Image (tube, grey):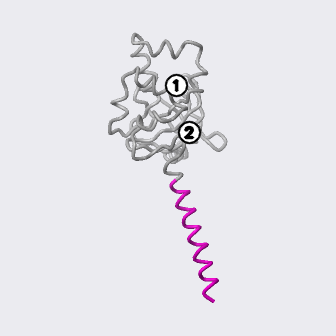
């Protein structure tokens, strides 16, 4: 009679371990082949992502490392290397030149919102506002979000748009949402 109970205890222990593993995986999502740790700041995590080397180089060239390493909180819409590759040839190389620092800073801060905004926050705001949510960027522009399929799409004021490909990558000083277009 103790055997069925010990099997049940073993099965329940296995379920508990599997659940704990799933929660840990959510806490440390993989981005660019690297785990993202909520105990690290935005820059500390971004430098480990193979998909964000162009973004990290741009942040360094713009002099934003200290800011994005600071207390925040910040919400960053982080374009991948593939997103930067969609730009016309030579664009990134020109932007990271010292004489273009102000322009580069403006572009990068257009991808940042003050505060910690999760996908659930975007969804709640969109639900309350007819299906769209808008937020002011640090650069002073507006990003507008709307549901597209199972995910979210974000538009800038000029009509450019990107898809959020990995939402809710939590950091010690904010949250990153990976996007597929600059």
Q: Secondary structure at mark 1?
A: loop
Measuring 53% from the left and 32% from the top, which residue is drawn there?
50
Residue 4 position (above or below residue 122):
below
Left/right placement of residue 163 relative to residue 104 reads right
Residue 83's spot in the image, x, y percent? 58, 26
Q: Residue furthest bottom?
A: 1
The tally of labels here is 2
Residue 46's spot in the image, x, y percent? 46, 35
Residue 85's spot in the image, x, y percent? 59, 21
Specify whether residue 20 is painted magenta.
Answer: yes
Quadrant of res 145: top right
Residue 86's spot in the image, x, y percent? 61, 21
The label nearer to you, 2 versus 1, is 2
Instruction: Say if residue 106 shows up in the picture.
Output: yes
Q: Secondary structure at mark 2?
A: loop
Left/right placement of residue 92 relative to residue 115 reads right
Residue marked by disc 1: 157
Q: Residue furthest front?
A: 3
């Amino acid at each position: 009679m103790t055997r069925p109970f010990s099997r049940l205890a073993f099965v329940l222990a296995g379920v508990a371990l599997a659940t704990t593993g799933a929660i840990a995986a959510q806490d440390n999502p993989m981005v660019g082949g690297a785990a993202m740790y909520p105990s690290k700041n935005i820059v500390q995590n971004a430098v480990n992502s193979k998909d964000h080397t162009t973004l990290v180089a741009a942040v360094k060239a713009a002099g934003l490392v200290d800011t994005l390493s600071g207390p925040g909180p910040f919400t960053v819409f982080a374009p991948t290397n593939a997103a930067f590759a969609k730009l016309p040839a030579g664009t990134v190389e020109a932007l990271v030149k010292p004489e273009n620092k102000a322009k580069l800073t403006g572009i990068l801060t257009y991808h940042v919102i003050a505060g910690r905004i999760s996908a659930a926050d975007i969804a709640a705001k969109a639900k309350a506002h007819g299906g769209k949510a808008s937020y002011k960027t640090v650069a002073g522009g507006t990003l507008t979000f709307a549901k597209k399929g199972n995910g979210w799409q974000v538009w800038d004021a000029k009509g450019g748009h990107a898809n959020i490909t990995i939402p809710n990558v939590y950091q010690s000083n904010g949250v990153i949402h990976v996007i597929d277009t600059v």
